[in-house]
Image (spheres, rainbow, N blue to C red):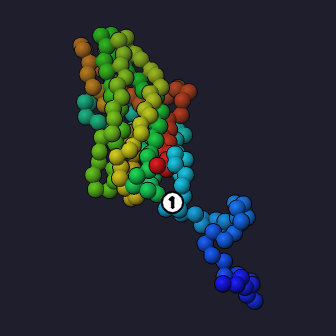
Amino acid sequence: MAITINGNGTITGISVGGLPDGIVDTDMIANNAVTDAKSTISGGVVQTQQFQLSSPSAIESTSTTYVNTGLTDTITPTSASNKILVIVNLNTYIDSVPTYGSQGQIRLTRDDGSATTELTTYRFSSWDDVSAELSTIVYWDTTHNSTSQLTYNTQFRLESYYQGAATVYVHRSGSPHIPNISLIEFAV
């Protein structure tokens, strides 16, 4: 078949693979023209979401029931097989009376709109009367299997104390760290 340049600017008669190597560069590809199905990039960052509590108020609890921290974010995966890296930074604090030690717990959950799944937990503890620290959770979510919106949430509770009483806190005032959550989707 002959190659024809038409009056409207289109070209006919070129077979698949008929262009020389290197003739199509990045500038020639239209924005959003390469879909996930056509992309061969594996392991690259597809999208990121990030939320931080710029003016957090301290939340305290003496209960062993989980309480929301207010640190939550959502992401809609572009592929059900992609991985979501979740990174959480929280300010945690324990106040024990007397000084016999206590433990608090943070958990990370994922809500897909039909069910909430506990993904992981993190323990923070004190063997003195008080303990303050930056608590970090890093979690690879490889089980979401969804292209629907996913909500990642953090909660905390008093796990145990040995004598007297204890109170656990998140976002205690005076901490230099800004609580934040990051969600990063990686192509598989």
- Asked if residue 9 lies left or right of residue 43, the reply is right
* Residue at the spot of label 1: 36
Above or below, comparing residue 43 to residue 19 in the picture: above
Residue 140: in sight, yes or no? yes
Residue 143: give x, y in percent of width and height.
34, 46
Q: Residue at x 72, y 85 (%)?
A: 4
Q: Residue at x 36, y 29 (%)?
A: 122
Q: Secondary structure at mark 1?
A: loop
Residue situated furthest bottom in the rendering: 7
Q: Residues within 10 Å of mark 1 (few under 14, many from 20)?
A: few
Residue 25: in sight, yes or no? no
Q: Residue at x 29, y 36 (%)?
A: 66
Residue 46: give x, y in percent of width and height.
53, 52
Residue 96: give x, y in percent of width and height.
33, 16
Front residue of this view, candidates 185 and 112: 185
Q: Residue at x 30, y 10 (%)?
A: 100
- Asked if residue 98 lies left or right of residue 147, the reply is left
Image quadrant holding the N terminus, namely bottom right
Front residue of this view, candidates 13 and 105: 13
- Asked if residue 159 lies left or right of residue 136, the reply is left
Front residue of this view, candidates 50 and 7: 7
Tag count: 1
Identify residue type, mark 1.
Asp
Residue 109: give x, y in percent of width and height.
34, 42
